[in-house]
């Protein structure tokens, strides 16, 4: 229930942000242009009527006729006047690029942008609803929506960027009879960058990598396993996989999408098997898992995923790229809303496919076999994750091999008898890289075989008499290579984490921090320099004091005609407001590198202090609990 509330709250938030991104700028433009046009109408009519009334050359009838004409032809309608008798009025008032011409077309552009936004919002909702109908419509609706949303969102970026630039001039020019070149330049540069980025990204071919961390298992490496898979595929009435990939990830899956394995591109049907999981499953339980995966092949699930998966990945990449380029944010939330709606349809379909594959597996083996395999896989994945989290949370460096596989294998049976295990299994899911799987209890009900929680531990602790891993001749060598690579990456990532966590307090900790955050020096004008380190900022100018990161509340970089300056805002108060320190720079081409480095090192310090604060809270809680 809590998860459902979170999802609904997130959907509502994205929907509201979509409304803001689609309509805020055009609505502001429309309000401004309508106000200006109505004000000009009133002022123009008042001025014209005064001139007509004061013109002694006109008879009363002529004055009445002229007044009636201007009252029926307000200034705001001049650009719409197309009748022959109105040509003179149109040409005088609405010459190209005149003020009236600009306001007229800005008003029209705002209206049509609002209409386009409403149409896109409706299209996102309708196409998302179609995805719930059936699998065929789901693919067709997403392809249509993908093209429509990406192209139209780029058009939105172009239109709204043009409005921002136009408003940056006319808002100040209209109300205060002056304009600011710097404001217009900033708006123009931001708009141009957003338009370029949106269009460039739209036509750029985004990567669609699908890399599997594993090694190929040839027919000669596991002839009995291959034969068993062919037998199961025949009983499922589907073609067997073209290749089997073995690894140490805690899942089994099939795919028909092209994938990369150790630099080799695989096509066709690929089955991934987890060697560590095969070692905890007996052959009947493993057969149930393999039959489940083959049922996905037979049911067309992988064919659908192969067609849709790359498009989903590219759509997601485009969506998130639109978030990081300033004004392109106007496109991000519409794309994100459409993707969220589509994800609900995919999640529902995924659950239905899992239920169906479970029933096929239960029919080919036994309901108890598929249920016990799900319990063992969930338990292994949960315990391995727990072991790795504890290793990663340690505040000391890891030396040499970690032996994660051995820890998990030795600790799984005792873990299965603990209270923590039962609590973890209540919300357990079976890990899978492509689908959102239903909860374990629902999958038990689906196959009609319920196992009470009190029996979970005995199932997990029971070692198989024979496993399919025993019939893969290369299994041991594959595990050794892959665990070695995995633990090396784990140690590297852990050390990087420590570089963020350490203050540092010892020479050993300092060495770790310096490996990832060495001092950086930037040459400034007049022979000065500024150094950045994990401790703070160190200007070398005469009289300049070092600035520890603990004293920094905010950083502002200002670039002006007098040179670039870093303004450091401190936590304490000055004479007026917060105390600040200004550091004259003069970096030239190095300024972007400098800004990135300052932000990176300051972020490290903030992460470190937040980590220390969290540790103090946990220690206080433990102390409080111990005294109760």
Image (cartoon, rainbow, N blue to C red):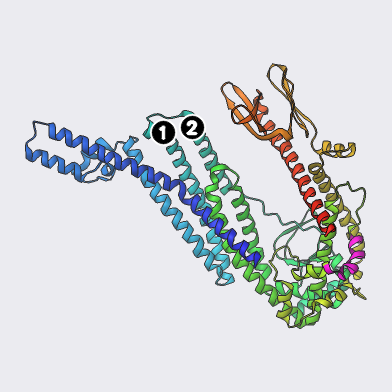
Left/right placement of residue 125 relative to residue 355 reads left
Left/right placement of residue 442 relative to residue 201 reads right
Q: Position of residue 73 (x, y in %)?
A: 22, 44
Residue 46 seen from this side? yes
- CB atoms of marks 1 and 2 within 8 Å: yes
Label 1: few (<14), some (14–19) or many (≥20) C-alpha neighbours in 10 Å: few
Label 2: few (<14), some (14–19) or many (≥20) C-alpha neighbours in 10 Å: few
Label of residue 183 in the image: 2
In the depicted view, which residue is nearer to us: 285 or 454?
454
Q: Is the stretch drawn in magenta largely helix, strand or loop?
A: helix
Residue 215 seen from this side? no
Compared to 375, does 147 lie above or below?
above
> Does the magenta run of residues contain 408?
yes
Compared to 576, does 383 lie above or below?
below
In the depicted view, which residue is nearer to us: 177 or 89?
177
Q: Residue at point 49% right, 35% down?
A: 188
Q: Residue at point 52% right, 35% down?
A: 189
Position of the C terminus, as image quadrant, is: bottom right
Q: Hey, which residue is sitting farthest front in the picture? A: 628
- Secondary-structure class at tag 2: helix
Of labels 1 and 2, the one closer to you: 1
Position of the N terminus, as image quadrant, is: bottom right
In the depicted view, which residue is nearer to us: 530 or 369?
530
Residue behind mark 1? 172
Distance from Cα at disc 1 to Cα at disc 2? 10 Å
> Does the magenta run of residues contain 94?
no
- Secondary-structure class at tag 1: helix
Q: Position of residue 275 (x, y in %)?
A: 86, 65
- Segment tinted magenta in the rendering: 405-419
In terms of image quadrants, where is residue 287?
bottom right
Which numbered disc flags the more N-terminal residue, 1 or 2?
A: 1
């Amino acid at each position: 229930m809590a998860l459902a509330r979170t999802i609904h709250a997130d959907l509502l938030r994205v929907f509201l942000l979509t409304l803001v991104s689609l309509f805020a700028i055009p609505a502001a433009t429309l309000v401004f242009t309508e106000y200006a046009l109505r004000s000009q109408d009133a002022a123009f009519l008042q001025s014209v009527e005064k001139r007509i009334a004061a013109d002694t050359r006109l008879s009363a009838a002529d004055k009445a006729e002229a007044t009636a004409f201007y009252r029926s032809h307000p200034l705001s309608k001049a650009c719409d006047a197309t009748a022959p008798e109105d040509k003179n009025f149109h040409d005088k008032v609405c010459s190209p690029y005149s003020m009236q011409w600009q306001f007229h077309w800005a008003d029209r552009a705002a209206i049509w942008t609002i209409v386009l936004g409403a149409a896109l919002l409706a299209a996102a909702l309708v196409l998302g609803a179609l995805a719930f109908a059936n699998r065929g419509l789901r693919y067709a609706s997403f392809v249509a929506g993908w093209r429509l949303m990406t192209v139209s969102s780029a058009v939105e970026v172009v239109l709204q960027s043009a409005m921002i630039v136009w408003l940056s001039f006319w808002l100040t020019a209209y109300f205060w009879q002056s304009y600011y070149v710097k404001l217009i330049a900033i708006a123009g540069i931001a708009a141009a960058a957003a338009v370029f980025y949106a269009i460039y990204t739209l036509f750029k071919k985004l990567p669609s990598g699908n890399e599997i961390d594993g090694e190929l298992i040839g027919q000669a490496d596991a002839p009995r396993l291959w034969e068993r898979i062919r037998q199961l595929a025949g009983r499922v009435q589907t073609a067997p996989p073209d290749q089997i990939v073995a690894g140490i990830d805690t899942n089994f899956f099939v795919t028909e999408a092209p994938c990369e394995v150790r630099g080799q591109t695989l096509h066709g049907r690929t089955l991934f098997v987890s060697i560590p999981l095969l070692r905890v499953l007996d052959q009947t339980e493993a057969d149930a898992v393999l039959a489940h995966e083959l049922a996905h092949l037979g049911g067309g699930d992988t064919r659908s995923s192969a067609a849709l998966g790359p498009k989903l990945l590219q759509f997601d990449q485009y969506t998130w790229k639109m978030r990081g380029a300033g004004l392109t944010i106007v496109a991000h939330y519409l794309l994100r809303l459409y993707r969220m709606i589509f994800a609900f349809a995919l999640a529902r379909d995924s659950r239905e496919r899992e239920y169906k594959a479970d029933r096929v597996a239960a029919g080919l083996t036994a309901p108890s076999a598929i249920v016990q395999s799900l319990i063992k896989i969930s338990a292994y994945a949960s315990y391995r994750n727990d072991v790795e989290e504890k290793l990663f949370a340690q505040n000391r460096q890891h030396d040499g091999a970690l032996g994660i596989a051995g820890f998990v294998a030795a600790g799984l049976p005792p873990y299965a008898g603990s209270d923590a295990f039962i609590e973890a299994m209540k919300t357990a899911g079976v890990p899978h890289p492509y689908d959102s799987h239903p909860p374990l209890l629902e999958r038990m009900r689906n196959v009609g075989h319920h196992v009470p929680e009190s029996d979970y531990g005995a199932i997990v602790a029971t070692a198989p008499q024979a496993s399919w891993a025993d019939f893969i001749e290369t299994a041991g060598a594959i595990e050794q290579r892959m665990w070695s690579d995995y633990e090396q990456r784990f140690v590297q990532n852990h050390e990087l984490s420590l570089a963020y966590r350490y203050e540092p307090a010892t020479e050993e900790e300092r060495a770790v921090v310096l490996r990832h955050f060495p001092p950086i020096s930037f040459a400034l004008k007049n022979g000065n320099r500024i150094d950045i380190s994990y401790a703070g900022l160190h200007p070398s100018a005469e009289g300049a004091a070092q600035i520890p990161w603990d004293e920094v509340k905010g950083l502002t970089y200002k670039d002006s005609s007098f040179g670039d300056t870093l303004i450091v805002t401190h936590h304490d108060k000055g004479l007026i407001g917060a105390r600040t320190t200004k550091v004259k720079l003069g970096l030239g081409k190095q300024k972007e590198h400098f800004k990135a480095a300052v932000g990176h090192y300051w972020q490290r310090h903030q992460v470190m202090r937040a980590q220390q604060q969290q540790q103090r809270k946990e220690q206080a809680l433990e102390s409080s609990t111990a005294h109760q």
